[in-house]
Structures are given as C-alpha cells and as structure tokens.
Image (cartoon, rainbow, N blue to C red):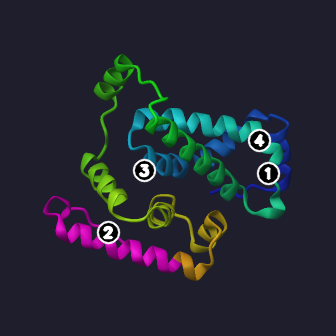
Amino acid sequence: MQKINKKFIEKLKNKDSDAFNIIYQTYHKNLYNYIRKYVMNDFDSDDVEQEIYMRMLDNICLYDYKKGSFSLWLFKVAKNYIKNYLMARQRGKIIYDDDKVHHYVNYYPIEDPALDKFLKEVKAKISKDEYDIFMLRVFSKMKYTECVEYLGLTIDQCKKRYLKAKKRINKIIYEKKEFSDIIVKKV
C-alpha cells in the first residue's frame, strides 16, 4: 500500500486526477471488502463505494495529517457513510430498481454465498463493537494500532474485543454444521 504524504494530499485537494487514481488503486480492495461486509451485496457496495470516494473528495479539506493517517481518515468517512446508508435502508428510504438488481444478479453473481450467510449469522450474534473489530482486522487487514485510532479504543480494548469476537465466531462455526467448511484463519 502506498504511503500517502502531505504533498500528495495537497494534490488531492487541488483535484488532481492522478492523485485520485492512486488513492483508488491503493485503497479500493480493502475499502470495498470493508463496505461489502456491512452492506452485504455487490450491487449496493459499488454504489456505496462510489459515494464514499465522492465524500472523500468533497471533504478532503477537512483531513489533517497531524491527527492520523489518511487511511484511517478514509475509513472513518466510510464508516460514517455506511452507518447512515444502513439506517436509511432500514427505514425504507433506499429505493431499489428491480430491473437493475435482476440484471446485476445475472451477470455478477455473489462470489461466496456461504461466506455471506455466515457473516450475516455472525453479525446477528455478536455485538456491533466485536463485529467492527473483526471486520477491520480480518477483511480490511488493519493492524491493532490502526484499529485503535479508527475505533477510539486502547490497544488492550481492541485485543480483548477481537479475542471475544473470535471466540464467539468459533462457537458459531462449531454449533452450525453448515458453517463447518468455513475456516477463519488467523482470526
């Protein structure tokens, strides 16, 4: 992952398209995985990711490199947008175009439906804090030090929540025969 420095942020603030392309190439995979695990489908994840990048560009002037790394700031933008998106979706304010959904499902099938089902089960059975730390560590591949800044916790709190989440997830795997083929490595 490319290190984003102060000069690079200035280019981004000046709407440099090359700077944006580098940001996209650097963070796309991890950001998309993070979004996908909360939004739970590819169709909406693409839209959410696009909106997050738009918000990033609109709010880049608010980023202060002294307060933390760019990746943490970007993931905070993502976290806030996802939270608002999910609340709006729950209230029924997000309208789905059935034709687009049907078209998308036919051409872009979900890569691993078993994993999606597993993550929905996990999300229902563990706390939001445990789910957040699990998603950051496993799918966004953040280190504890990054999780600390992102979640506003101490390293000990992050480790305890992660270990608790890992224990509960292993219990879910053990209890549900259908999830026995899902092995969470180094969870």
Res 186 visible:
no
- Towards the viewer: 6 or 149: 149
Any mark on residue 63, and which? Answer: 1
Report the residue marked by disc 4. Answer: 59
Could you tell me how far apart the alpha carbons at marks 1 and 3 are, in whole angstroms? 26 Å
Which amino acid does the dot numbered 1 rest on? Tyr
Which amino acid does the dot numbered 2 rest on? Ile
Q: Secondary structure at mark 1?
A: loop
Report the residue marked by disc 2. Answer: 169
Tell me whether circle 4 and circle 1 mark residues in contact (CB < 8 Å): yes
For the C terminus, the image quarter is: bottom left
Res 130 visible:
yes
Which stretch is magenta?
159-187
Above or below residue 60? Residue 176 is below
Report the residue marked by disc 3. Answer: 37
Q: Secondary structure at mark 3?
A: helix
Residue positioned 47% across, 50% down in the render:
33
Above or below residue 60? Residue 69 is below
Snapshot quadrant of residue 107: top left
Q: Main secondary structure of the magenta part?
A: helix
| Residue 29 position in % (x across, y down) | 52, 48
